[in-house]
Image: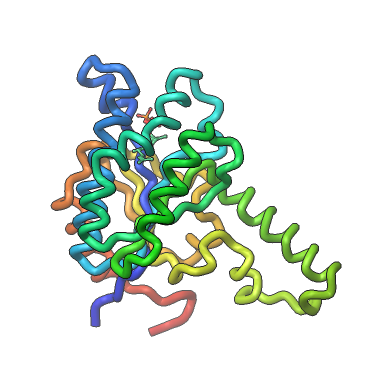
Amino acid sequence: MENQIRHVAIIMDGNGRWAKKQNKPRTAGHYQGSENVRNIAIAANEMGIEVLTLYAFSTENWKREKNEVDYLMKLPSVFFSRFLKELMEKNIRICMIGEMDRFPKATADILTEAIEQTKDNTGMILNFAMNYGGRREILLAAKHYAEDVKNGKINNDLDEEKFEHYLMTSEFPSLDLMIRTSGEIRISNFLLWQVAYAELVFVDEAWPDFTPEIFKKTIEEFKRRDRRFGGVK
Ligand code: FPP
């Protein structure tokens, strides 16, 4: 029987290299990348995927040049003004993992508004990881758990399942597949806990060139994989 697929995560890498190849500024790559978010989200929704988590901005991305960071902070506004209506029509719900507190107010407002407007939608969850880092997520979960123990809210009998309630992904199904575009073979601090038993696929295409057809082929590959979760079949 083929593997069921519920939760897919993508490291959308290669916008900068895509732009450079076309003699365009890096920001043009991010613009094209945001358009591809729309294409892949629509395709994922049509394929019945329940959650698509996209790495849009890592806790390390603040180190980039100011003009690039400023542009990446404007992208949610560019994206939702172009596509929110369509996502709404497709019954897609917007979620976010990461910490909003460092965002410019306008960015936080637009994201909050998109999350609020789509909160009753029952189709796919399009989940943006923004100002997100896997180590930080685990650290925050540990702190939160320690506080709950200190305040007598829970017993000191932590196990993996209980710990998962403290992660930012607690309401989502387990991660099935992580894809990275643009040829690099690393995880870059993305969903470190959740990736434990996910399948990994690395593709050579830059994110703006990662078409719904390539995405579908990736999902087909996932479905054929032999998932054993450490056991024996
Ligand atoms: C990595 O490519 C990409 C990013 C850091 C940004 C990804 C963001 C998007 C694709 C758009 C997100 C859309 C919304 C709506 C928030 P890179 O710049 O590291 O590429 P390079 O490795 O070729 O330089």
Position of residue 14 measured from the top left corner of the image (x, y, whole percent): 33, 33
- Residue at image position (64%, 56%) is 138
Give the quarter of the figure containing the C terminus. bottom left
Give the residue at x 43% y 65%.
175
Name the one closer to the observer, 171 or 117. Answer: 117
- Residue located 33% across and 54% down the image: 201
Q: Nearer the viewer, residue 188 or 83?
A: 83
The colour scheme used to paint the residues is rainbow
Position in image of residue 31 (x %, y %): 28, 30
Which residue shows up at 75% across the image and 58% down it? 143
Nearest the camera: 154 or 80? 80
Q: Is the N terminus in the top left, top right, bottom left or bottom right quadrant?
A: bottom left
In the picture shown, does residue 135 fall above or below 233? above
Q: Is residue 91 left or right of residue 165?
A: left
Quadrant of ligand 1 in image: top left
**Residue 104, image x and y in percent?**
53, 32
Picture quadrant of residue 193:
bottom right
Task: Using residue 59 as the reference point, say whether residue 223 is left or right of it.
Answer: left
- Image: 12 above or below 7: above
Residue found at the very far top of the displayed protein: 23
The answer to whether residue 73 is visible is: yes
How many marks can you see?
0
Q: Quadrant of residue 20?
A: top left
